[in-house]
Amino acid sequence: MLAFDSSDTPPTTERAIKKPPHGNESYLALVWRRLRRSWTGMAGLVLVGLLILMAVFADFFAPMDPKATDVGFAPPQVMSFHDKDGNFVFQPRVYALSDSEELDPVTFQPIVGMDYDNPRLLGFFVKGAEYKLFGLIPADRHFFGSTDGQPVHFLGTDKFGRDVLSRAIIGSRISLMIALTVVFIVTLIGTTVGMVSGYFGGTFDIWVQRFVELVLAFPQLPLYLALTSLIPVTAPTNVFLGFVIVVMSALGWAQMSREVRGKTLALARIDYVRAAMAVGATDRRIIMQHIFPNVMSHVIVAVTLAIPSVVLLESFLGFLGFAVKPPLISWGLMLQDTATYSVIGSYPWILSPVGFVLVTVFAFNALGDGLRDAVDPY
């Protein structure tokens, strides 16, 4: 009879069966693995993360006080790694424009040129304009700017001499806040109405869908202009902003409701939902435990694709003067300075907020496309 040596038995951790790298994956892990294969989806995810980070810490990333004034319509200052003699230097710098002693032979105006004798050195985490982080913590550090606190305009200034880059970074707060708030309200109302209407069906569903069709039939742009014009110009900015959010949400939930209703109609006929009905489960439990988790994948993708639409709508209404009023700052409000062709032709850097809008739209669209492929690869 052979003796059994317990020392030959491998430890419990070594005897454990190793799971395959992709075996028994959760649904979220499977979606994440598919999303990582899409370079556009990952690029959108990174850009969305950077945009949200920029909006949350806007005062820190803005190189200057967005309300500080300087020379009006000053051109962008280009960062340089060369001194006045053309030698390469490691610390970046910018050269401000100054009037020289020479006169233009035609206009007899002083010739404007670079002031190479007084460079403005640049650096990270420099001291600048004071602000309150999250509205509570006093601070004066900025991510990038001049080391001596002198004004630097990487994207030039507007007609009042305010830094365009700082205003665009601060304006991302209002633009993204409006977009995220509107999409949240639209998703909440549209998902709830769509699931309830599709689940119960019958006469209730017919009347709900007629109301949805009535909302969808409204011409949105004239209605936006008509409703926002009802607010007096002297109304507080918070009241005006809240009214705009309510109007956008009231006109935007119907499309989401129609999409969720279609998904719910298909899910209500699946076997496990019928089995839950047979065992006496309540309607609330069936909707929340069986239908809602299965429509969430579609809702998440719809949210990422709806945010760019709201950003574009806010920019358009802000350009017309119907979205945000000063002293608040948004990308649409900044585009009001581009209302005339002469300004665009003479000072093209005023169009810089368009770049922020395009990056935001691309980021959320790319993320939405990547999520759509990851959620439903077929």
Image (tube, rainbow, N blue to C red):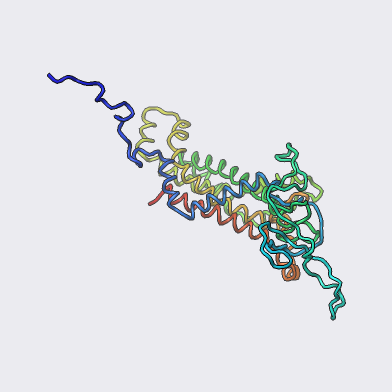
The image position of residue 292, as x and y in percent, is 47, 38
- Front in this rendered view, residue 274 or 115: 115
| Residue 290 or residue 251, whichever sits in front | 290
| On-image quarter of the N terminus | top left
Quick one: 188 or 136, which is closer to the camera?
A: 136
Residue 75 visible in the picture: yes
Residue at coordinates 45% horizontally, 47% vertically from top-left?
262
How many numbered marks appear? 0
Q: Residue furthest bottom?
A: 106
Residue in the image at 17% along x and 19% along y: 3
Can you tell which quarter of the image residue 75 is in? Answer: bottom right
Answer yes or no: is residue 338 visible: no
Relative image position of residue 273 (x, y in whole percent): 39, 35
Q: Identify the residue at horizontal 66%, vertical 54% (top origin).
A: 314
Position of 294 relative to 216 (above/below): above
Where is residue 259 drawn, in percent x and y? Answer: 49, 48
Residue at 67% in and 50% down: 172
In the image, taking residue 292 as reference, residue 327 lies left or right, namely right
The extreme left residue here reads 1
The answer to whether 217 appears left or right of 316 in the picture is left
Residue 189 x %, y %: 57, 41
Query: Looking at the image, is 268 positioned above or below residue 1?
Result: below
- Vertically, is 232 above or below 358? above
